[in-house]
Amino acid sequence: MNIDTKVLHSYPVVDPNTGAASIPKYQSSTFHQKAFPEKQPYTYTRFGNPTIEAAEQAVASLENGKYGVAFSSGMAAITASLLLLSAGDHLVLGENIYGGTFQLLSELLSRFEVTYTFVDERDPSAWEKAIQVNTKMFYLETPSNPLLTVTNIQEVCQIAKAHQLLTVCDNTFMTPYYQQPLALGADIVVHSATKFLGGHSDLVMGFAVTNVAELCEKLYKNQKIIGSIPGIEEAWLLLRGVKTLTVRMKQASANALTIAQKLLTLSNVKAVHYPGLEQHPDHFQHFQQATSGGAVLSFELTSKSQVQKLFQQVKIPIVAVSLGGVESILSYPWTMSHACMAEEDRLKAGVKPTLVRLSCGIEDAEDLWLDIQQALEGEENEKN
């Protein structure tokens, strides 16, 4: 079944009890145990809920995975995955990662004697060289946030398997529509469903997907112990949003390519980071494992004042934290996604005060470009 059909038909979309075309919100914290003391599927929502379970099956299906586990946020999914490590274990991960993941390692897991090494994620040999006797996991994020660097998923996962290491891959930017890390060898795929899977900037949720029953059991246990289950409303919104994933991604990604190409023509844009561009250093590798450049790009301006001018003068994109909505979203990684990192760490990771991230929405591409162009070039002020 093609994924355009799978988003509508490969998981529970009809309520088995009533035939409703939308899985209901089972807004209940607990369930009557009518056959007590015999076991039943649902007893307490922290242990399982039909609406949440339908969402888990939906995302697992799209990733071609057997098991999906839903969480209260993308960070909760990442935390539950990294908590598969124990005290004394070592982790290898790319140096260009989401700021929240960096903070989790530096401020929390380090307190429990989990050590880690950052490597140039684009170089598979760097991953192998970083392996220590106590290394237990590789953590990948590709393309990275916010510089869109690319990791060779298949080769890095092969290295991990040769050394009996777990691999976790953050697939938030590409979504299962454009990239399938499980098929490339990853053991666990994580998502911030807050972004493209939900798609409407109205929920906070995360997922972990795997084909390994033992890993699924451990993730569920972490979810239950931490208490990081999503709300029923969020699970229902996810089921609503994922039905339009493919059509949203097609339009948003086409817009991103158009905007990235046009940004290259502006003199006050120093660099454009988008793997869909042939000029991107990881372009070839990216298209060995993904089918699109995606809907997110970042670009560098020549000064902080230009960043401020851009954010003040744009009318179509909103200026906000997050990405993946139907509306275009301009973000400032320096004070948003990576603000939790020390300035020295941000600069080391390539996150500069002049860097802007754009998550393209589904607006008309020409309207979006003209708005961004006037904000960057001051055309509106000149006309006035």
Image (cartoon, rainbow, N blue to C red):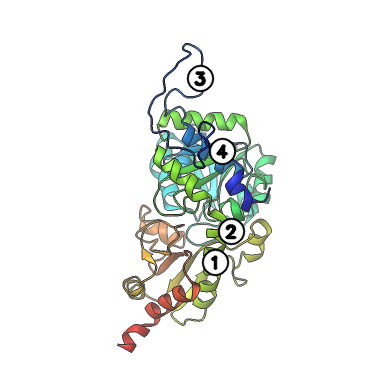
| Label 2 crowd bin: few (<14), some (14–19), many (20+), radius 10 Å | many
Figure quadrant of residue 358 = bottom left
Give the residue type that dot 4 points to: Pro
Q: In this view, does 169 lie above or below 368?
A: above
Is tag 3's residue or tag 2's residue first in the polypeptide sequence?
3
Residue 325 % position (x, y)? 44, 58
Specify whether 71 is left or right of 279.
left
Disc 3 from disc 1: Cα separation: 49 Å
Instruction: Identify the disc placed on residue 150.
Output: 2
**Residue contact at pointers 4 and 3, CB within 8 angstroms:** no
Toward the viewer: 67 or 168? 67
On the question of residue 137 being in view, the answer is no
Disc 3 from disc 2: Cα separation: 45 Å
Residue at horizontal 41%, vertical 49%?
100
Residue at horizontal 40%, vertical 32%?
227
On the question of residue 157 being in view, the answer is yes
Dot 4 corresponds to which residue?
A: 12
Dot 3 corresponds to which residue?
A: 40
Q: In this view, does 203 lie above or below 215?
A: below
